[in-house]
Amino acid sequence: MQHDFYLAWRYLCHHRVRTIILVACLSLLATLPLALHVMLDAGETQMTARAESTPLLVGSKGSALDLTLNALYFNAANQSHITMAESDRVGQTGWADPLPIYVRFRVRGHPLVGVTLDYFDFRRLTIAQGNSLAMLGECVLGADAAEAMGLKPGDSLPTTPENLFDLSGVYPIKLHVAGLLAKSHTPDDQAVFIDLQTAWVIEGLGHGHAEGKKPSQSYGLPFGQVENHLIHDAKLLTYTEITPENLDSFHFHGDPSGYPISAVIALPHDRKSSTLLKGRYIGNEEAVQLVQPLETIRGLLENIFRVGILFDAVLALVGAAMLLALGLVFALSMRLRQRELQTIFLLGCSKTKVLRLVSAEILLLGLASMLVCLALLEFIQLYAGGLVRLFITP
Amino acid sequence: MIAVDALRFSYPKDGFCLEIDEFNIETGEKVAIIGPSGVGKTTLLKIIAGIIRPDSGKIHVDGVELHQLSDAARRNFRITRIGFVFQELELLEYLNVFDNIIHTYRINPVLDLDYSVRERAHRLADDVGLGNKLARMPGELSQGERQRAAVCRALLPNPRLILADEATGNLDPANKSHILDLLFEAAHRANASLLAVTHDHELLPRFDRVVNFRTLLDIRHIPPFPEGRSANELARHF
């Protein structure tokens, strides 16, 4: 047996290129379906964990999946917004604590997520460098986002208007990086977090500008002189950066309860509160729904696994075709080795021994392919989480 | 050592038929067989080696009734008692010289590859001037060196009978003589018999006996030769 493997090994070493091609084919053949399942498992684990940690979600009526993907994974689905009043309403029930979240904008490819400070406690996000959000116009970066953009505390990050002609809507400002979050291996690593109010400033609902001029002369008005009457002209300086000096000049117009948010993460105090809150939204005729992210994600995963089975079937067919092709290669190589086989047969080698030599070669090829497959799987397993997060958080 | 009696063998496909009434070689005898190509010299060597089985007749080699043995027994007999130096028995390209020399020990469990065998292989390689080339691959050797390595492979199991078929055919005169010296020395040392097929008449005086194949056999090609020559005409030719 030892001699069989030695001779097979020498043969495979001598025909390196052929061996490498065969091992590459076999290992890919084995790795592809397994890697797919590793990715699916990693996706399931991550998505389920995130959904499990988010008990209830309130958002606009429509696709529960879009709402969940938007609020949990910052997916840029075209999600309708609800107002801040819905967050207040959840809080006023006394059954749950509301965590409003606003995901609409992206900055340099990363989701710009408007949250309150409670969000960081809820997700157990800790500051690795710098400080948490303290002032309007500041942002805190997820670990992967910071690495990808090469930013550190003290740097600035300009937001961009949604399009060139969006003059009245989105308000581009220069964000100050206050801190970087420690890696959490969740979609939060990809995000740029800002205060809700900063998100509304970017939305164009709040702004800051220089003081207007007092009128140089008093105009006689029919109902008397108006106090604090200012004149704003076209040269009025609008701030695009929020600094301690101009912070006071930033203000909002309209009723804050009407300001947009994407969703409210509702944290019920207990099971009874959860049930009561769910009941509140059953048959709700308003444009709001309450979803349980875990159920929504399970439904999504079931579909993904159905697709996975389809992939398996396709890969099985491709695998069978590849095995046939490899069999043909092997058969042709045996024909090329006729003289060698004739030599060892003349020397005194039995046909069984020839079969054993060939089997040893196949076993060694299989073993090498298995090792390559395991190494690839180990590598994929190592980076599966990150890859899955990249897919989940586009 | 070799006793052939009323041997008959034929290739059914091309109608070739070999018949030898009697042929003997004594232990330690060095015999050369000469004759034109295609008359059955190599076939006779293969029958003596047990590679092919005669249709009828008796053949005794080193006291063994070869015609009575099964395939497996003839294989084991061949690998332990007979050393081959055939031109068609090339070195394996994927093994280095040393591994080629000991190759027979790896392909049949009847031979046990131990330390003494490895030592002997080294000595044989030294004797033929390949001592410093054992790690080389066959592709890195000259034709003469390859043939010397093949001789080492044939002699390593200390065979009782050495069969050489055109062993020196492609070699220059110096290498021819060297290879023959090796075979003679090995045969002499082990008191083994040597049966060599050769076309090289310059080498014949070195053998104890030279056998003209025509005197041995009654060759018949059952269907006529393509050229239309009969077996009798062929026999007259040599």
Image (tube, coloured by chain):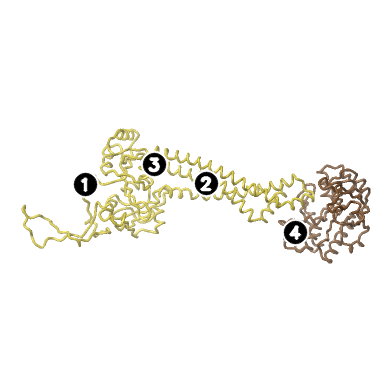
Chain colours: A yellow, B brown
Residue located 32% across and 38% down the image: A289
Quarter placement of the C terminus of chain B: bottom right
Q: Earlier in the sequence, mark 2 or mark 1?
A: 2
Front residue of this view, candidates A230 and A19: A19
The chain under label 1 reads A
**N-terminal of the two: label 3 or label 2?**
2
Q: Residue shown at 59%/43% (left/top)?
A: A320
At label 4, the amino acid type is Val
Q: Which mark is residue A53?
A: 3
| Horizontal side of residue B152 vs A160, given as left or right | right
Whole-percent x and y of residue A286? 27, 37
Q: Which residue is mark 1?
A: A255
Q: CA distance from mark 4 to mark 3?
A: 68 Å
The kind of secondary structure element at disc 4 is helix
Distance (Cα) linking label 4 and label 1: 92 Å
Judging by the rendered image, the residue that carries numbered circle 4 is: B97
Packing grade of label 4 (10 A; few <14, some 14-19, many >=20) is many
Q: Is residue A139 left or right of residue B82?
A: left
First along the sequence among labels 3 and 1: 3
